[in-house]
Amino acid sequence: MSRLVLKFGGSSVADPGRMHAVAARIEPFVREGNEVVVVVSARGKTTDELLSLAGELRGQDNREMDQLLATGEQQSIALLALALRDRKVPARSFTGLQAGIYADGYHMEGRIRTVQPHCLEKALAEGVVPVVAGFQGINASGDIITLGRGGSDLSAVALAASLEADACHIYTDVTGVYSADPRLVPEARKLSRVSYGVCMEMAVMGAKVLQARSVEMAAQYDVPVYVASSFDEEEGTWVMREDVNERLVVQAVTQDGNVAKVAVLGVPDVPGIAAKLFGALGQNGIGVEMIIQSVMRGDVNDIAFLVHKAFLGEAIRICRNVARDIEAQGVTFDTEIARISVVGAGIANHPEVPSKMFSILADVGINIDMIASTAQSITCVIPSGQVETAVRALHRHFVEEEAPCASPS
Ligand code: ADP
Ligand code: ASP
Ligand code: MG
């Protein structure tokens, strides 16, 4: 008998038919005698629809946004509990508060502080399957706080860690973690196993199949994560400590069109300026990536960085204020960009990878705007209209041609 957390994403529970299919998928785990906790996302595109509904009213307030967004998952838990009960599987729905998920930090970007799943333990002891709302917790003021986009993955891993589950299964609309987004690259290969480190780098760089913070938490608490499809029975991907898939240097190619570039121009070259700029952004909960300071022109620099598109308006407002303060020459932004990355264990130890990546992009006529690298990835910012071409070319040269005989898994 195992203790398992099974998480089902939005497309898996989009309508009553899918709710029944998911209940049928859960039932055998219960009948086999496992202790099962289910985590569920909002149905289909509900979260996006709620966001655009609120956008029409424009009275920006993130506390109210969280109150609104959390309703998506609350519908799902009750509906899935009903579908399970219809199959005579005892089930009970739990909101984040009822499940004991406590979070703090900024609204819409909450961080899990602690999980106290007493009510879930009680339900399990009674032979009841708890169906928990993903993506939501409760803060010290008793307000609902959501955990960032894709946050149901994080809820599931956090519950698996605190309930000391044997594994956390993430059921979605693809059959595992692939060497590129299979919707963009039909030749993408399913990875039978991938290490936490590589999977996290993939997620940070845009592979949305798992939320990056959920992989980070799985690594921290050593929770084995199994990613599979809720639509068929095909073998999925294990994300775990061992990395048994090192035959390719580059294991995946990712893309992220959800970022925008901000540049602060003509920044005086004196100590404390970067601290002031990024301090102001950080205090407002705006994460930045790929910070690049250009070579000095006279006695000024340009500083450019990426932000998620959702935070662009706020980032520009803050940068304009700081620019005025520090007497910089101006602030510009560009939303027509995307970043593409090659990801793999030990990329930093293979000096041929960067030049090969840049040559592949040059050969398909793509101009690189910014470059950054980590131990496990190299990332280029390019025009958003050329993402598909870039990802397919990189995947062909780095994955398909490097290991033409490798089995698809
Ligand atoms: P869910 O609603 O189940 O949480 P998501 O939409 O968040 O599902 O994530 C699944 C999607 O992730 C897939 O439909 C796929 O297009 C996308 N994806 C991006 N990169 C990858 C990758 N490397 N491997 C698998 N899926 C990927
Ligand atoms: N419903 C939330 C979202 O769309 C959380 C999730 O699906 O993981 O981001
Ligand atoms: Mg998701």
Image: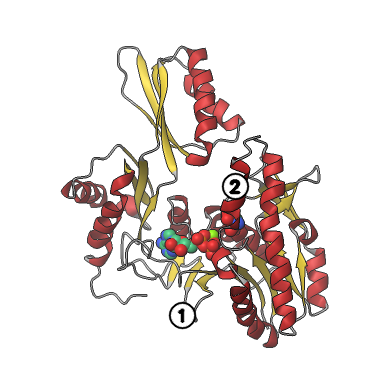
| Most foreground residue, 389 or 141 | 389
Residue sitting at 32 percent across and 19 percent down? Answer: 296
Residue sitting at 77 percent across and 80 percent down? Answer: 90
The location of residue 155, given as percent across then percent down, is 65, 59
* Dot 1 beta carbon under 8 Å from ligand 1: no
Q: Is residue 76 left or right of residue 44?
A: right
Residue 298 in the image: above or below residue 144: above
Q: Nearer the viewer, mark 1 or mark 2?
A: 2
The location of residue 44, given as percent across then percent down, is 57, 62
Residue on which disc 2 sits: 51
Dot label at residue 60: none
Q: Amino acid at mark 2?
A: Leu
Q: Is residue 91 left or right of residue 169?
A: right
Q: Amino acid at mark 1?
A: Glu
The type of colouring in the image is secondary structure
For numbered disc 1, what is the local secondary structure? loop
Residue 95 in the image: above or below residue 403: above
Circle nearer the N terminus (1, 2) = 2
Dot label at residue 234: 1
* Separation of residues labelled 1 and 2 (CA atoms): 34 Å
Q: Residues within 10 Å of mark 2 (few under 14, many from 20)?
A: few
Q: Is residue 185 left or right of residue 89?
A: left
The location of residue 15, given as percent across then percent down, is 60, 70
For the question of whether residue 169 can be seen, the reply is no
| Most foreground residue, 78 or 277 | 78
Quadrant of the rendered structure where residue 285 is?
A: top right
Q: Residues within 10 Å of mark 1 (few under 14, many from 20)?
A: few
For numbered disc 2, what is the local secondary structure? helix
| Most foreground residue, 302 or 195 | 302
Which residue is at the far front?
56
Which residue is at the far bottom?
32
